Image (tube, rainbow, N blue to C red):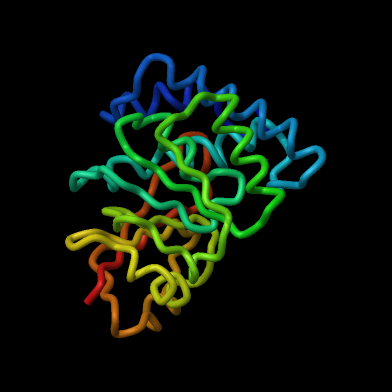
Amino acid sequence: MSGGISLQDGIAELVGRGINLAPDTGRRLADYLGLLQKWNQVYNLTAVRDADRMVTHHLLDSLAVLPHLEARPVTRLLDVGSGAGLPGIPLALARPEWRVTVLDSNHKKGAFLHQAVAELGVPNVEVVITRVETFAPPAPYEVVISRAFSDLSTFAEATARLVAPGGRLVAMKGVFPHEEVDQVPSTVRVTDTCRIAVPGLPAERHLVVLEPA
């Protein structure tokens, strides 16, 4: 397989690492993948076109961050610049007890997010179509995460106000962003950086965790 691993085997590997996933998580993720493939043919939601690569680069990549998010209790999570719902929808499918907000300013991607939430039956996901700078949620979030939203400084400046006391900003990155880390504003501090191992994906993946200073 060009993606390196099947969804079933990737989930089994994550479970083997101690990540708790309900038995129906694989089926629900496969349903989401089918919707993503279908809509991607028309709306160009993601540059990854191959289904096998979507498994590794999107689904397993999203789930591999779970142990790091769960280092502290999570009830509310905001996915900024969610695009096609990544990582927000896979995380919501894996953790139905979390309240997940997927936010994007692109209306075509927003249409997909609304349809995916409706078809998949994901009651713990709220879709918001707006710019993060104008977003005013009723309550802050323990985790504000982004996968491909911006550089660390822009991410921090746009979202630090949305973090609950004791909460975290979590940026998913490829190769370690040394220059970005050096340039984070004084309003936040980097509290953790770690390498993420994604099943079937040999490319580098890192998390950078920031907290309001």
Q: Residue 36: x percent and y percent?
A: 66, 34
Question: Toward which corner of the image does residue 144 lie, by quadrant?
Answer: bottom left
Q: Residue at x 43, y 25 (%)?
A: 11
Q: Residue 90: x percent and y percent?
A: 47, 35
Q: Residue at x 25, y 72 (%)?
A: 212
Question: Toward which corner of the image does residue 63 lie, by quadrant?
Answer: top left
Q: Residue at x 39, y 30 (%)?
A: 94
Q: Residue 172: x percent and y percent?
A: 44, 56
Apparent side of residue 183 relative to residue 81 in the rendered image (left or right)? left
Question: Toward which corner of the image does residue 96 lie, by quadrant?
Answer: top left
- Quarter of the figure that contains the N terminus: top right
Q: Is residue 25 above or below residue 68?
A: above
Q: Residue at x 54, y 51 (%)?
A: 82
Closer-to-camera residue (148/201): 148
Q: Is residue 47 above or below residue 49?
A: below
The residue sitting at the top extreme is: 23
Q: Residue 198: x percent and y percent?
A: 45, 40
Apparent side of residue 124 relative to residue 67 in the rendered image (left or right)? right
Closer-to-camera residue (136/89): 136
Q: Is residue 59 above or below residue 69?
A: above
- Quarter of the figure that contains the C terminus: bottom left
The residue sitting at the front extreme is: 138
